[in-house]
Image (cartoon, helix red, strand yellow):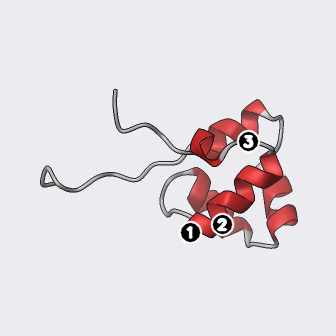
Amino acid sequence: MSNNQQIVMNRIKVVLAEKQRTNRWLVEQMGKSENTISRWCSNKSQPSIVQLQEVANLLDVDVRVLLKSQKE
């Protein structure tokens, strides 16, 4: 991987756990497939910016909380 590529990671799974919510709950709230939500939670795929904002709204958090910092 070259230096100018970034790995996009989200914290949806972590924040769901912090809020005591499940993938299933998010599936029901968003009307998405279980497979889609599972892939987001495992970082195999990423939601769009609009979808990420919807997740943040449902979980009552700032959208930035759902993003993993690139700085370690």
Residue type at the position of mark 3: Val
The quadrant of the rendering that contains the C terminus is top left
Q: Distance between the residues labelled 1 and 2?
A: 5 Å
Is 30 rendered above or below residue 60? Answer: below
For the residue labelled by badge 3, is the local secondary structure a helix, a strand or a loop? loop
Residue 24, by quadrant, is bottom right
Please provide percent x and percent y for residue 3. Answer: 14, 49
For the residue labelled by badge 2, is the local secondary structure a helix, a strand or a loop? helix
Please provide percent x and percent y for residue 6. Answer: 29, 52
Q: Which residue is drawn at 85% across and 54% down?
A: 25
Residue type at the position of mark 1: Ser
Q: In this view, does 37 lie to the left or right of 5?
A: right
Q: How far apart are marks 2 and 3 (CA)?
A: 14 Å
Q: Residue at x 17, y 54 (%)?
A: 4
Please provide percent x and percent y for residue 12. Answer: 63, 46
Q: What residue is pinned by disc 3? A: 61
Q: What residue is pinned by disc 1? A: 48
Q: Which residue is drawn at 63% across and 48% down?
A: 63
For the residue labelled by badge 1, is the local secondary structure a helix, a strand or a loop? loop
Q: In this view, does 20 lie to the left or right of 1?
A: right
Residue type at the position of mark 2: Gln
Q: Which mark is residue 51?
A: 2
Tag 1 near tag 2, CB within 8 Å = yes
Is 53 rendered above or below residue 14? Answer: below
Mark 3 or mark 2, which is nearer the start of the sequence?
Answer: 2
Please provide percent x and percent y for residue 69. Answer: 43, 37
Mark 3 Cα shell of 10 Å, populated few (<14), some (14-19), many (≥20): some
